[in-house]
Amino acid sequence: MLKCQKPLFSLDENVHYLNCAYKSPLLKNGEEMAKKALLSERNPFNLKPHSYFEISDKIRIEFSKIIHCHKNEIALFPSTSYGFANVFNNLKVTQVKAITVENEFPSGFFSIKKWSLENEIMLQTLTRNKLSAKDWNQKILDSIDEKTNVVFMSSVHWMDGTKFDIKKIGKKCKSVGAYFIVDGTQSVGAMNINVKEFNIDALICAGYKWLFGPYSMALGYFSSKFNNGTPIEESWMNRTNAEEFSNLTDYDSKYKTMAGRYNVGETANFVLSPIMLNGLKQLNNWGISNIESYCKKLADPLLKQLIPLGIKFEENNYFNPHLFSLGLPDYIDNINFKKTLDNKNIYISLRGKNIRVSINVFNNQNDINMLIEAVKSVLK
Ligand SMILES: Cc1ncc(COP(=O)(O)O)c(C=O)c1O
């Protein structure tokens, strides 16, 4: 079992940061590597042509181990919105219906909305209403049929952590020939995702949360369905002759293989890339299953202590130990409760009507105990 990894971070000692879904803290190693990278900008003569490609390739290798694909199926960009723009720009119109779920994150939602409008596809947003997570998942599965062109959703709901049956949904998409596009921002790095096993056609993740990367770096997986697509920009770096610096104007119209065409220009991002690479290496070193078990070990006592007091959590199979919502009694005002937590240096996020708690390996039992005590202090 993984031990608490707090010593690898520089988090303030007196803070209980239960908010990795907002942004991960910086790993000490990543900080050192970024400082070194910044200082090396003093002497650009050390940069060789291969330096412009090497670090991005290393990032691809590490990320491919996490989501179980080939490194060349991965592209790097500054945000998920950039990744989704590439995905929806290359979605073939085959049917009449697009599906998403209620309250998806805006970057993905607006991408599918725009694509649906432009292509006169009916966009169906599947609401939860008062359904259990199990029934909501079933509603999603039942809605996918021969008329479905694409399903876009997160693997874990970003606002309250509801777990989706990604594997079953992917299988259903495949059986009807629909694209399956997933926002993995709030799950990849904290739970096992296998893009091949789950029949995911494109998976887009921001890097600054569960991947311990910097803000302004995101990663995406593109299946072979996107191999011959058109990228949203024409970077010289994505051409097959890019590494021959003296021959760049022998204009090569061929893009790099597989997802290589979807990388953002200036992909190497010399200062931020070392943070991203370090985060991914660290994840592979810890092991995703070990991170899952660690978060579960911390979340279990919280459930044990708070459920008998009437606090509601997502039902068993749909409860996510790394990201979940605290269902407080109606008489407690969320904004006031957040103020109580802020005063105790306990950090969480309010998302819609949810009190979103998110846990990672830098948290310890004391952080959880502090949250339990804070909840108890506001109960009648
Ligand atoms: C589910 C999800 N997707 C994407 C993002 C970030 O989107 P972008 O990289 O477009 O800023 C977030 C940020 O909170 C998120 O929670």
Image: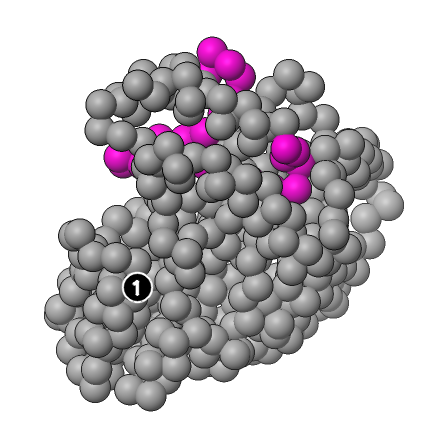
Residue 25 shows in this picture: yes
Q: Horizontal and vertical percent for residue 255?
A: 56, 74
State left or right for residue 257 relative to residue 104. Answer: right
Q: Which residues are magenta?
A: 342-365
Residue farthest toward the front in the current orientation of the protein: 308
Q: Quadrant of residue 8?
A: top right
State left or right for residue 371 relative to residue 335. Answer: right
Q: Nearer the viewer, residue 244 or 189?
A: 189
Looking at the rendered structure, the kind of residue marked 1 is: Lys
Residue 212 shows in this picture: no
221 versus 349 height, above or below: below
Residue at (20% x, 57% y) in the render = 131
Residue at (54% x, 66% y) in the render = 193
Q: Quadrant of residue 127?
A: bottom left
Q: Quadrant of residue 25?
A: top right
Q: Horizontal and vertical percent for residue 160?
A: 36, 44
Q: Which residue is mark 1?
A: 134
Residue 364 within the magenta-colored segment of the rendering: yes
Q: Nearer the viewer, residue 146 or 131?
A: 131
Residue 195 within the magenta-colored segment of the rendering: no
Q: How many marks can you see?
A: 1
Q: Nearer the viewer, residue 267 or 226?
A: 226
Q: Quadrant of the C terminus?
A: top left
Q: Horizontal and vertical percent for residue 238?
A: 59, 66
Q: Nearer the viewer, residue 367 or 156?
A: 367
